[in-house]
Amino acid sequence: MTLAPPPSSRVQLTEDGKLRHFLSVEHLPRSLLEDILDTAASFVDVGGRAIKKVPLLRGKTVVNLFFESSTRTRSTFELAAKRLSADVLNLDIAKSATSKGETLLDTLRNLEAMAADMFVVRHQDSGAPFFIANEVTPRVAVINAGDGRHAHPTQAMLDMYTIRHYKGGFAGLRVAIVGDILHSRVARSQIHALNILGAEEVRLIGPRTLLPTDVEQLGVTVFTDMAQGLKDVDVVIMLRLQKERMDSALLPSEGEFFRLYGLNNEKLRHARPDAIVMHPGPINRGVEIASEVADGPRSVILNQVTFGIAVRMAVMSMTISGQESNPDHGGDHGR
Amino acid sequence: MTLAPPPSSRVQLTEDGKLRHFLSVEHLPRSLLEDILDTAASFVDVGGRAIKKVPLLRGKTVVNLFFESSTRTRSTFELAAKRLSADVLNLDIAKSATSKGETLLDTLRNLEAMAADMFVVRHQDSGAPFFIANEVTPRVAVINAGDGRHAHPTQAMLDMYTIRHYKGGFAGLRVAIVGDILHSRVARSQIHALNILGAEEVRLIGPRTLLPTDVEQLGVTVFTDMAQGLKDVDVVIMLRLQKERMDSALLPSEGEFFRLYGLNNEKLRHARPDAIVMHPGPINRGVEIASEVADGPRSVILNQVTFGIAVRMAVMSMTISGQESNPDHGGDHGR
Amino acid sequence: MTLAPPPSSRVQLTEDGKLRHFLSVEHLPRSLLEDILDTAASFVDVGGRAIKKVPLLRGKTVVNLFFESSTRTRSTFELAAKRLSADVLNLDIAKSATSKGETLLDTLRNLEAMAADMFVVRHQDSGAPFFIANEVTPRVAVINAGDGRHAHPTQAMLDMYTIRHYKGGFAGLRVAIVGDILHSRVARSQIHALNILGAEEVRLIGPRTLLPTDVEQLGVTVFTDMAQGLKDVDVVIMLRLQKERMDSALLPSEGEFFRLYGLNNEKLRHARPDAIVMHPGPINRGVEIASEVADGPRSVILNQVTFGIAVRMAVMSMTISGQESNPDHGGDHGR
């Protein structure tokens, strides 16, 4: 499918600056990202309560619209929606014959007509959630759950939450992102978020074959050597190595990758003594990260998962609230 | 599987005339169909509310029992049930090994024993929902979500709702149903509903190869030419062309079908100027309908989808209520 | 996968003897099994009510973690959880690529980090639920929904409920279990439960090739002849014959098996006149049981299904309550 290029991210905001879709952190104002983190903080407690449920989205219909299968990501959005008391409809478009040759737009129009309030969209094509957000009726919020190599903004925001939680803020922070930057929508979203939130320095570490060519424009420093790249960083973010890249000859072998870029305690010595280690999961033990690090005292990988539910609850409740404050909003379809 | 022929549709009603199963519109009294439409009207508003939920089926268990996969139809029933506050269990019998060689009756008995309140049944064999309704215990309501070539009564009723909404009623109305009538359970249910509700004239338009042989008994007028068939009609209902029919040599080609029976603005000129265009979806653009019509001002295709949720909520709440008013009703199983 | 041998079943109980996991009936005290049956009795009524819902697990997250697919068993746990007002997440690990090469432990840690409260585990390997229960954080309850050839404790408890319901208790009772004992996790759990609850005599009936070698240690009497084995029993439990066993030459043929061990009215004459007939389902008509018996007056097979929902509700609410009374319990993850 060819999709129109992503338009200005102004589509994400209402006229008075509230979030109505969440598609990409790029171009969003710092205050809004901080709002998301603050709202998420109020939801972190919900997961620890005896009754893990708040009524904010009661009577709303959230559709998980997954054109690319991902049980893990779908599960986190499903739990977040249910803890907000929403009704959830899971549509695994990748596996079903739902559309029966129907166009994407016709599928969307049908779901809108069923009075869906939110589409959580996962798509193999970059820009698909932007395309959808531009096409949906005013009362439907769209959340990007990962599109092609473009963005995975809720993952980036849960990473930001984790960093702020452990480091108190972003001022003066040095953050290294390590591994297959080229194919990572997660890395792109992290870089934008870190720059917007005012991190001191964002470093990318990886082999030249796995670095994007436009890397200089991203406001980052590039390293191909781990010892140099990790020197004195406060945060190390390891990326998942996609095994498919190995087959396509972009990389020599798993063993060779681990020797050069896999994070073990020895390489971690170069970072600051209080550095935290993050990973979006699922981890490949012995490929990009050694078990001694993944299970070690500096790893906050599982805390990221916990914070991820809260961040998704925050983005869901903020976009629904943004839609409802929109003057275009109306429930007059079919009448 | 061979099933017993559908028994009298009296199985659908309680002794005092209330709906307890919804299997077919055939033989149902006009007052009951009007009741369904009136009840649906009260639910259309629910989809436009901030909290799209009413407690009518709270604590009830609705089982979507799909022997034939259909993500779209299943989704509409799932949403309708959830907006009525029911608990929903989706059983995709076509894809699962649930039954492990178990008979249909044993599967039903097991679900009854789990205290299910409603079976929404989709089945490739005509008559299967009737068979099931005859066999279930008195307290379980059965809704036909499409059986073989026989019936798709909730689709027909949402079509009737749409017609009444835009035309005010059925008296004096001319309605044309166009396309593959032969294989369409939707068309059969529509013809019965239109005749019961008192439409002036029901016309069928299509190639002779796609018209049923018993067509004269259905109380319809038959046309093989679009210009003649559409002349002065108030409502045009296009049917989805099943691509499989093409392969079986019942039709020359998609292009040829579109040329003769595909609805475009030019052919639509023959209908009344205020005629509405309907389609059960999903649409095949450029096969049975041109985009200029599907997306044009006379199309009410997406409104049908919206009304469809309301009609399914109506039928679900009416059958549950009918079951509860039944003297045979009891919760004494297993005691 | 090789798993550590099941540790002492003390992992199932809190220090003051409350149930916190339900993995196996073996080694559990009689008073606890009686507690489960008594708690289930209070839930049997819920299935007969107009509103089949109690708020005991409101705001809790139950994860159906099925490494081996079983739509039927999953459905019973899903319904039980929903009637307790829990949120349910179904993970069909067998069919999904969730783990993407991730270890079992990493999958568990991730679900824990999402603040799951309960794992309902089905696994092809004996001992897997014990392994999981030993590894989970204190606040997560684990329920065994069938593991390898080892145990299926909720099935055994629903069988005990059924026996107590129809026979008033276990003292003096003679119970025969018939069929493929060797491969049956159900039979193993039943034998333990019957012995703990004080049944007078547990008999196993089947061909030598389908009896376990350690059968003498189980506290049972063994018969290879139906007439002798069924003589004067109060309860007959038929097991499902797995067709796969036939292929592996452990059995001559379905016809031969039915002739020797299939339960028909003639063989049933040897049992007491008021004997009840049970089966865990799904039944193979004409293989291990004749329709005249399955559908006859002594069959309580469907009542077992009804009681099964109540027993699962009991075990779910008791383990959650046990976890909450645990001093190790805390919601401080991620903080």
Image (tube, coloured by chain):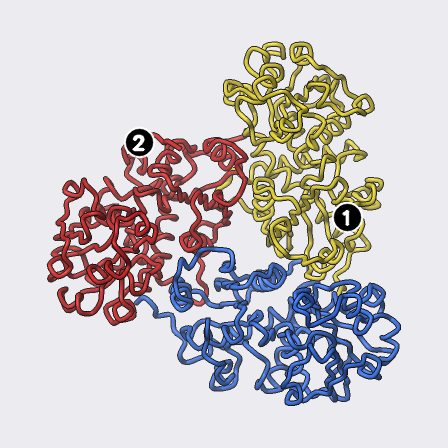
Chain colours: A blue, B red, C yellow
Position in image of residue B267 (x %, y %): 17, 65
Instruction: Give the tally of numbered discs.
Output: 2
Numbered disc 1: secondary structure: helix
Q: Is residue C277 left or right of residue A107?
A: right
Query: What is the chain identity of the residue bearing mark 1?
Result: C
Q: Quadrant of residue B79?
A: bottom left
Q: In which quarter of the image is the C terminus of chain A?
A: bottom left
Q: Residue drawn 38% across and 53% down? A: B313
Give the Cα separation between the discs numbered 2 and 1.
53 Å
Query: Please, which chain is the residue tagged with disc 2 on?
Result: B
Task: Report x, y in % for residue B235.
Answer: 19, 60
Quadrant assignment, res A111 = bottom left
Q: Can residue C47 be seen in this view?
A: yes
Task: Say which residue label 2 marks.
Answer: B5
Q: What residue type is labelled 1?
A: Ala
Give the number of the disc on residue C133: 1
Residue drawn at point x = 33 percent, y = 50 percent: B247
Residue drawn at x 40%, y 53% is: B73
